[in-house]
Image (tube, rainbow, N blue to C red):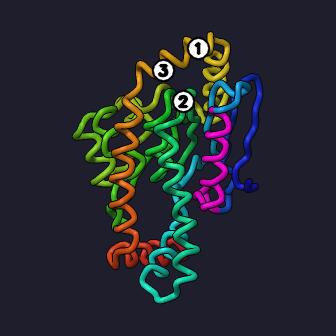
């Protein structure tokens, strides 16, 4: 477990909160591991009915920590076998998390306030309910970093939002407001920042009070085939890992980190 993810349980509602404010909740390998462990354990536990993702004030999560991606890219281009193997393991935690998402059997809800970048946005496509503050912004700058969409977003995005809007978000890298995500059908409600978590937890408690077997069956009937999503996730992951090793991505990571330090 890591101090950068807080796991809580109350009345059948398992909360998974990103708590790395100094990095605007950018996800590290340890955070991915903690999230995957909690989702898998929660799905097996009769005490857990709902999973709820929470961030912090002004930042849900800014996605993967780019410094980890740069370390992997640099090691992939080097002759240091030990470093390559160690960093391969850290990147494996990213892929483990995105492979877990399509297979989660219990409802997932997210409360977003502020920045939702990369996996912070594509994660929401797997959630059953999403509530966002009116100051939230959503972006997936994959191409700007020399990468490609992940977490089955290339399949879920067009299905949920329509092709044109999904292309804007996932390929053009356009920044979407909470209102635009609401209009696109990804966000269920837009509320004030101080209300967003309570809105999500209120919905979670309502669901947790319903007959659990009927809830599970109903959710399964409504959602896309998890195996189809898993297949697309694997295809994306292969392309994503190849791009991580590319000179194009390595240069983009270096430029991003240099700019962020200014």
Discs 3, 1 touching: Cβ within 8 Å: no
Q: CA distance from mark 2 to mark 3?
A: 8 Å
- x, y (%) of residue 74? 47, 81
| Residue name at image x 33 percent, y 47 percent | 169
**What is the number of the mark on residue 213?**
1
Which residue is under mark 2? Answer: 105
Badge 3: residue crowd in 10 Å (few <14, some 14–19, many ≥20) = some
Which residue is under mark 3? Answer: 219
Badge 2: residue crowd in 10 Å (few <14, some 14–19, many ≥20) = some
Residue 173, image quadrant:
bottom left
Discs 2, 3 touching: Cβ within 8 Å: no
Question: Which of the two labelled residues, at mark 3 and mark 1, occupies the earlier sequence position?
Answer: 1
| Residue name at image x 59 percent, y 49 percent | 59
Say left or right for 151 vs 216. Answer: left
In the picture as drawn, the residue positioned furthest to the bottom comes out as 79
**Secondary structure of the residue carrying numbered label 1:** helix
- What range of the chain is rendered magenta? 23-43
- x, y (%) of residue 132? 53, 34
Question: Which of the two labelled residues, at mark 2 and mark 3, occupies the earlier sequence position?
Answer: 2
Q: Is residue 123 magenta?
A: no
- Main SS of the magenta segment? helix
Q: Is residue 261 above or below residue 207?
A: below
- x, y (%) of residue 204? 63, 23
**What is the number of the mark on residue 144?**
none
């Amino acid at each position: 477990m890591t101090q950068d993810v807080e796991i809580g349980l109350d009345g059948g509602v398992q909360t998974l909160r990103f708590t790395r404010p100094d990095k605007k909740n950018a996800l590290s390998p340890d955070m991915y591991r903690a999230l995957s462990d909690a989702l898998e354990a929660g799905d097996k536990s009769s005490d857990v009915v709902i999973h709820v993702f929470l961030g912090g004030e002004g930042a849900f999560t800014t996605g993967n920590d780019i410094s980890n991606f740069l370390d992997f890219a640099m090691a992939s281009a080097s002759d240091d076998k030990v470093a390559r193997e160690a960093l391969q393991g850290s990147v494996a935690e990213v892929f483990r998390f995105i492979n877990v998402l399509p297979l989660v059997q219990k409802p997932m809800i997210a409360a977003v306030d502020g920045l939702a970048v990369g996996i912070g946005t594509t994660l929401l496509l797997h959630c059953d309910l999403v509530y966002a503050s009116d100051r939230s912004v959503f972006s997936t700058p994959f191409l700007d970093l020399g990468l490609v969409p992940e977490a089955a977003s290339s399949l879920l995005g067009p299905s949920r939002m329509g092709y044109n809007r999904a292309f804007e978000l996932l390929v053009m890298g356009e920044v979407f407001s909470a209102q635009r995500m609401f209009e696109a059908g990804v966000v269920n409600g837009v509320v004030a920042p101080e209300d967003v978590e309570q809105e999500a937890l209120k919905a979670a408690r309502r669901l947790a009070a319903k007959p659990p077997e009927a809830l599970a069956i109903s959710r399964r009937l409504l959602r896309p085939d998890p195996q189809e999503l898993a297949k697309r996730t694997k295809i994306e992951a292969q392309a994503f890992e190849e791009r991580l090793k590319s000179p194009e991505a390595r240069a983009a990571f270096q430029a991003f980190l240099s700019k962020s330090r200014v």
